[in-house]
Image (cartoon, helix red, strand yellow):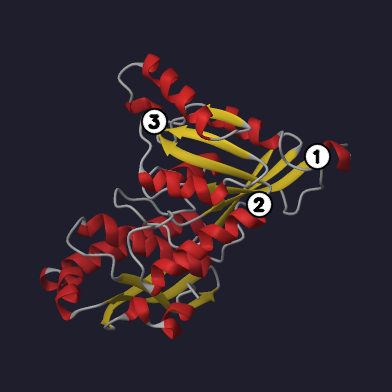
Amino acid sequence: MTSQTDFRTGYVGIIGRPNVGKSTLLNRLIGQKLSITSRKPQTTRQRITGILNVDNGQLLFVDTPGFQIRHGSALNRSMNREATQAVADVDVVLFVVEALRFSAEDNAALKLIARHGCVILVINKIDSIPERALLLPFIATMSQRHAFAEIVPVSASKGHAIKDLARTIRGYLPESAPIYQADEITESSERFLASELIREKMFRQLGDELPYVSAVLIDSFTLVGTLRKIHASIIVDKESHKGIVVGAKGSRLKEIGTQARIDMEKLFGGKVHLEVWVTVKRGWSENRQLLKRLGYG
């Protein structure tokens, strides 16, 4: 039997500029889709905790919004507060960068975590490098920017070196008994995960057609036996945006709902009845009351 002093448990913050693959990294570590992904930056807006049980350890991952330095809306300020709070609350910070790339946004995120006691640099997307030899000068340069506890090159999309990363993280966690049961993978509610899956499908279906002035509100979530009945509203800023989401004869909205329902059934392990509407709320990203209902307050 494992004694408490042999076991390590702690929170791990995943920090980095938008679109470096933080959500993909979390999903790969947990082995389950908990955080939504798309090619558009800033897909993640709220903190999500994923739970990974390893030998003699429990790693509690916090996926945060990409730190934003370009825009100042109430929504983006809320996202930056989430990222800042995550750094203060965790035992280990994973600072994720893209291989061979370090921008002003990367530097802003690094300044955010500069005073944390344990920062592990995760160099993601190494599968995109034409020659691995090119990585060595980049590692040398990054090691001069900050005294990282470790530097771990990975490919979140391909799964390269993910187990090595998990083992490395465990070594820096405090000795403590597990907080969650061995079969738990997240502390996020099904209601929240449902809204995130709808938002992911919306981003993937619409590509660059719809700006970042959209959100998903779960109007009702009820469990009838093993059937989950979910009613959701996609909130957009303009009538023209509503037409984009709905599509010709409702075809696009139907596809968003269908794909989201399929992923929900996989994640929840049961049947889902999903109904999705589109509603226009002008200036919603500056509406503090609505932001609070959406969980951004």
Count of marks, rendered view: 3
Query: Residue 145: image x %, image y %?
Result: 50, 34
Residue 192, visible in the rendered structure = yes
* Residue hosting label 3: 99
For label 2, count other residues whose C-alpha is less than 10 Å away and answer few (under 14), some (14-19) or many (20+).
some
Please name the residue shown 31% across and 59% down the image: 201
- Of mark 3 and mark 1, the one earlier in the sequence is 1
| Amino acid type of the residue tagged 2 in the rendering | Val
| Amino acid type of the residue tagged 3 in the rendering | Ala
Secondary element at tag 1 = loop
For label 3, count other residues whose C-alpha is less than 10 Å away and answer few (under 14), some (14-19) or many (20+).
many
In the rendered view, would you say 74 is above or below 94?
below
Figure quadrant of residue 76: bottom left
- Of mark 1 and mark 2, the one earlier in the sequence is 1
Kindly give the residue lying farthest to the left in the view shown. Answer: 248
Kindly give the residue lying farthest to the front in the view shown. Answer: 144
Which disc number belongs to residue 121?
A: none
Question: How far apart are the two marked residues, 3 and 1, measured between alpha carbons?
Answer: 33 Å
Figure quadrant of residue 126: top left
